[in-house]
Image: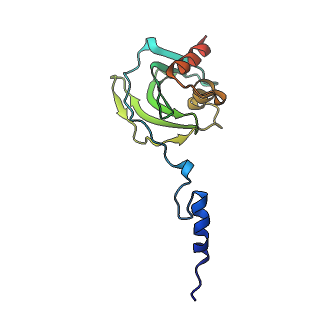
Amino acid sequence: MKKLPWLLLLLPLTAQAGFSIFGSEPEEKKQLKEAETVLPAYPTPQNLLPFEVFPTQNRYFVDSNSITVDKDGVIRYTVVINTPGGATNISYEGMRCETGERRLYAYGHLDRTWSKAQSDLWQEINFAYGHSYQKVLYEDYFCPRDRFAKTAAEAIMNLRRAGR
């Protein structure tokens, strides 16, 4: 009788655990089904809600009209960053509170148009970096202490409360 490689003996155990030794991911790590993303209207100054990111001198805003919370659990929003030197950076992004991830969908241009981000993969939010505006939005406004904003109105209320 031929001996089976020891690796084959592990297959039934790994199948029951929900993963494979051959590289597929555990069930809970598989990509969540995401709703189709529609770019929002370009931000206007009257709809910008400020938020603080210390100790940077940049000024940060979220466009209140762009905030959505979809059934897929993703909060989508437009961020506007003004630098002391006069530059303006605009991006349309998403955040998953449950997984602590962020995604960049598009960049805004001064001619009021959008261009799709080259890399639109979900990435972990860097919670170790203190100057990350995504970290601040996650911890203070959109996903504070497991009280995730369930609606756009809740996210806007959190931003307005902080701006006072």
Task: Give coordinates of residue 118: x percent, y percent.
Answer: 39, 41
The total of numbered circles placed on residues is: 0
Q: Residue at x 57, y 87 (%)?
A: 2
Residue drawn at the location 45% of the way across and 42% of the way down: 33
Which residue occupies the foreground of this view, 9 or 164?
9
* Residue depicted at x 53% and y 42%: 123
Q: How is the image coloured?
A: rainbow
- In this view, the residue farthest toward the bottom is 1
For this view, does 119 lie left or right of residue 145?
Answer: left
State the residue at coordinates (55%, 62%): 20
Q: Position of residue 78 (x, y in %)?
A: 45, 25
Q: Position of residue 30 (x, y in %)?
A: 51, 49
Residue 152 lies, in percent from the top left, at 50, 21
* Residue 40, picture quadrant: top left
Q: Nearer the viewer, residue 93 or 89?
A: 93
Specify the quadrant of the image occupied by residue 56: top right
On-image quarter of the N terminus: bottom right
- Quadrant into which the C terminus falls: top right
